[in-house]
Image: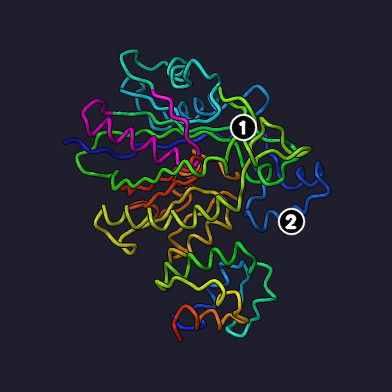
């Protein structure tokens, strides 16, 4: 899964279509505690990654999250 | 050994509707547009004052007999799944049995389950048939959560709808219902509960909300239910697929309990399932609890010519109880 495909799938999690890798997470209403819980489940399932919650919370953009789950 | 299959499905929706426009009229302080966007529900059905889950279930069963032409005297067992029976005793299954005029030499079982109820009831029907105890089992799943809701509780009022479904499970030469997987975890029982609804007296800690909910009103901790579903459903899906010896690509359709559109979309993303094989059709009827999976199956049969083949079903909810299976329609 490349970063652009990731952005589309992440958009489904936060209920926001049309996200790009550069989208700022702070601008997304759906990136709340529930969105984060959902993302943790998504990362575990799709990438086999058990996320570090602090690192996830410090991510600024969609691309940061992608790097976190893909190990990039 | 005999196997089982789904022979026919029918459902019945009460006539009374509770659309967003009516919700907004009664509760001008609620942001109905935003709620609908999250839940994906814009209308719901409501049983009338003198209409119960028993009535809805019996009407669905009558519809099943008239549509399919299946003779009711061939039914060898009846299962009635609801959490709103007419009485604590006698059982709803006996009342439905009488109304439907079924044979007397058959067993009638009540099952008190919610959103996983269809999978549980289906597994009972399948087990009866595999054991040689029945050739045709009538499974009724019907509920009326509206009877338990406080009118001012936004989270449940906008989400749940009343409905009844009837499913005829029959003997089959090949395995067309199977690969059941279950998960039971009573530690989550307080997150979806009607306190003071049975023999246990006293309030349940953490569920009261003065002015919003009384001690006998339905309480739902939506956030906790969401966390539960997101962690359990993918695991159950894997277990059923492994039991069936197939992969996601071998499944024609995915029909999950129609909890709410937001949760379904998240589950689909987590499980990595294709949108065109994933059924979401609760926009006009809401979350219909144990009736939701058979209604979703039947609606898909009616509107999608390609619908059929291997279908993975997953139910999850109150208890916590969750279950999945692979059916071949």
Name the residue beneath numbered marker 1.
B195
- Total marks drawn? 2
Crowdedness near tag 1: few (<14), some (14–19) or many (≥20) residues, C-alpha within 10 Å: many
Mark 1 or mark 2, whichever is nearer to me: 1
Residue in view at x 65 percent, y 21 percent = B50
Asked if the stretch drawn in magenta spans residue B251, the answer is no
Farthest left residue? B1
| Whether residue B196 is situated above or below residue B272 in the rendered picture | above
Label 1 to label 2, Cα distance in Å? 30 Å
Residue B135, placed above or below residue B299: above
Can you see residue B283? Answer: yes
Provide the residue designation for mark 2: B33
Q: Where does the image place residue B129, in percent across and percent down from the top left?
A: 25, 32
Tags 1 and 2 touching, CB below 8 Å:
no
Which chain letter goes with mark 1? B
Q: Can residue B291 be seen in this view?
A: no
> What are the residue bounds of the magenta stretch?
B109-135
Does B312 sit left or right of B135 as displayed? right
Q: B314 or B198, which lies in front?
A: B198
Q: Quadrant of residue B218?
A: top right
- Give how far across and how far down residue B267 sits, in percent: 49, 60
**Front in this rendered view, residue A26 or B189:** B189
Quarter of the image with the N terminus of chain A is bottom left
Vertical side of B272 occupied by B36: above or below: above
Which residue sits at x=63%, y=46%? B159
Where does residue A15 sit, x and y in percent of width and height?
Answer: 61, 66
Residue B53 placement (x, y as % from top left):
55, 28
Secondary structure at badge 2 equals helix
Task: First in sequence, mark 1 or 2: give its number.
Answer: 2
Q: Describe the element under mark 1 as helix, strand or loop.
A: loop
Front residue of B216/B86: it is B216
């Amino acid at each position: 899964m490349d970063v652009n495909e990731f952005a589309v799938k992440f958009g489904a999690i936060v209920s926001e279509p049309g996200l790009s890798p550069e989208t700022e997470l702070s601008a997304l209403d759906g990136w709340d505690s529930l969105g984060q819980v959902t993302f943790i489940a998504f990362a575990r399932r799709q990438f086999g990654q058990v996320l570090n919650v602090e690192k996830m919370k410090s991510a600024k953009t969609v691309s940061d999250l992608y790097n976190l789950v893909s190990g990039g | 050994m005999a196997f089982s299959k789904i022979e026919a499905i029918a459902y019945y929706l009460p006539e009374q509707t509770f659309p967003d426009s009516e919700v907004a009229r009664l509760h001008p302080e609620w942001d109905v547009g935003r709620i609908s966007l999250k839940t994906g529900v814009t209308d719901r059905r409501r049983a009338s004052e003198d209409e119960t889950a028993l009535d809805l279930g019996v009407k669905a069963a009558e519809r099943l007999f008239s549509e399919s032409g299946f003779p009711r005297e061939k039914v060898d067992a009846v299962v009635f799944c609801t959490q709103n029976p007419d009485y604590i005793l006698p059982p709803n299954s006996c009342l439905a049995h009488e109304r439907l005029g079924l044979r007397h030499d058959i067993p009638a079982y009540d099952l008190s389950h919610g959103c996983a109820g269809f999978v549980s009831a289906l597994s009972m029907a399948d087990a009866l048939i595999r054991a040689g105890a029945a050739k045709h089992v009538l499974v009724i799943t019907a509920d009326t959560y509206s009877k338990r809701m406080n009118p001012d509780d936004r989270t449940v009022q906008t989400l749940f709808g009343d409905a009844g479904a009837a499913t005829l499970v029959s003997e089959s030469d090949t395995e067309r219902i199977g690969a059941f997987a279950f998960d039971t975890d009573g530690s989550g029982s307080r997150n979806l509960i009607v306190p003071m609804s049975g023999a246990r007296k006293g309030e349940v800690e953490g569920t009261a909300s003065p002015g919003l909910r009384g001690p006998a009103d339905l309480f739902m901790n939506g956030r906790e239910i969401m966390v539960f579903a997101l962690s359990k459903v993918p695991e159950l899906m894997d277990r059923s697929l492994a039991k069936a010896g197939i992969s996601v690509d071998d499944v024609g359709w995915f029909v999950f309990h129609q909890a709410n559109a937001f949760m379904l979309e998240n589950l689909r993303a987590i499980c990595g399932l294709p949108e065109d094989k994933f059924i979401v059709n609760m926009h006009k009827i809401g979350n219909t609890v144990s009736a939701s999976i058979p209604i979703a199956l039947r609606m898909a049969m009616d509107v999608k010519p390609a619908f059929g083949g291997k279908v993975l079903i997953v139910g999850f909810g109150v208890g916590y109880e969750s279950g999945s299976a692979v059916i071949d329609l």
